[in-house]
Image: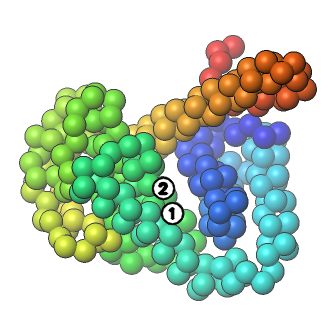
């Protein structure tokens, strides 16, 4: 079975990271999937559906490790930790620079929360540095704020929040708020400090960000597959048309109501 069990829904972002990195960074793919598997076993390791799904991922992890025996970032924990931290901070830096420059897109939002989720993955290697936890906390808050602006059509204010009124709308909707001025800093890779008044770091899944952006991405992919199918039909290429339509249906099936 390849369908994510409902019990593991909160862990979907880590599967998405592994999927996105499968052709770009095999070590990040490996450790994101490893984090998912370990977390999943803590949630449910008895129900047949969950056991079957996790076993598929564990078997894949074994094959991935066997195929990358010389990759230090897979076989050496210290190297893996340093690499994943570098990737997480690079993503955060990119998103932070875009944000401060007034550049907003779903990619910026995704980079903020992906960097935060990669810092979660770093917990596999022991206690985390306090600054990393601050980066995670700010990244998740910023992703939530930008996503809220995206939904409402409001133009986001670049950089760290300066007044609590920025999130009054979120507060009125029962979401988290920022209550005080946040100090700006010069180094883009660091979070605006101090951040003690920022919302608690509850994880992006609670904010619905990953799910909404993932939905957007999958609908966009489905549209592309349908476009490819239409192009194939113009040339009476039934095989290619059917192949692309099946891929579109596979992506959209989870959004249909029984």
Q: Is residue 114 above or below residue 255?
A: below
SS class of the residue under badge 2?
Answer: helix
Count of labels in the image: 2
Residue 56 lies, in percent from the top left, at: 82, 52
Q: Residue furthest right?
A: 239
SS class of the residue under badge 1?
Answer: helix
Q: Quadrant of the N terminus?
A: top right
Residue 9 lies, in percent from the top left, at: 59, 40
Q: In this figure, which residue is indicated by the disc labeled 1?
A: 118
Q: In this figure, which residue is indicated by the disc labeled 2?
A: 114
Depth order, front residue of 114/61 = 114
Q: Is residue 162 visible?
A: yes
The image quadrant that residue 245 belongs to is: top right
Residue 173 lies, in percent from the top left, at: 25, 28
Q: Residue furthest front?
A: 235
Q: Is residue 157 above or below residue 222?
A: below
Residue 21 lies, in percent from the top left, at: 64, 59
Name which residue lies at 61% across and 78% down.
80
The Cα atoms of the two marked residues, 1 and 2, are separated by 6 Å
Name which residue lies at 22% across and 42% down.
156
The image quadrant that residue 145 belongs to is: top left
Depth order, front residue of 126/3 = 3
Q: Is residue 242 visible?
A: no
- Give left or right: position of 214 versus 162: right
Depth order, front residue of 200/122 = 122
Name which residue lies at 80% across and 24% down.
232
Circles 1 and 2, Cβ within 8 Å, touching? The answer is yes
Q: Quadrant of the C terminus?
A: top right
């Amino acid at each position: 079975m390849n369908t994510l069990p409902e019990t593991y829904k909160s862990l979907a972002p880590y599967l998405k990271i592994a999927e996105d990195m499968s052709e770009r960074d095999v070590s990040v793919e490996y450790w994101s999937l490893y984090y998912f598997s370990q977390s999943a076993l803590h949630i449910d390791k008895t129900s047949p559906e969950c056991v079957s799904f996790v076993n598929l991922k564990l078997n894949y992890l074994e094959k991935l490790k066997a195929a990358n025996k010389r990759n230090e970032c897979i076989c050496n924990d210290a190297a893996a930790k340093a690499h994943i931290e570098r990737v997480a901070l690079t993503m955060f830096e990119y998103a932070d620079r875009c944000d401060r420059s007034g550049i907003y897109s779903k990619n910026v939002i995704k980079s903020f929360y992906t960097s935060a989720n990669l810092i979660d993955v770093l917990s596999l290697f022991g206690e985390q540095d306090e600054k990393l936890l601050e980066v995670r906390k700010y990244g998740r808050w910023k992703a939530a704020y930008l996503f809220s602006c995206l939904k409402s059509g409001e133009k986001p204010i670049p950089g760290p929040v300066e007044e609590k009124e920025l999130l009054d709308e979120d507060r009125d909707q029962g979401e988290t708020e920022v209550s005080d001025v946040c100090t700006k800093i010069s180094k883009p890779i660091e979070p605006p400090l101090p951040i003690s008044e920022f919302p608690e770091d509850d994880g992006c899944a609670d904010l619905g960000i990953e799910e909404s952006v993932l939905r957007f991405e999958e609908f966009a992919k489905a549209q592309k597959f349908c476009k490819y199918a239409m192009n194939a039909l113009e040339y009476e290429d039934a095989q290619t048309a059917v192949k692309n339509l099946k891929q579109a249906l596979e992506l959209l099936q989870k959004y249909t109501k029984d």
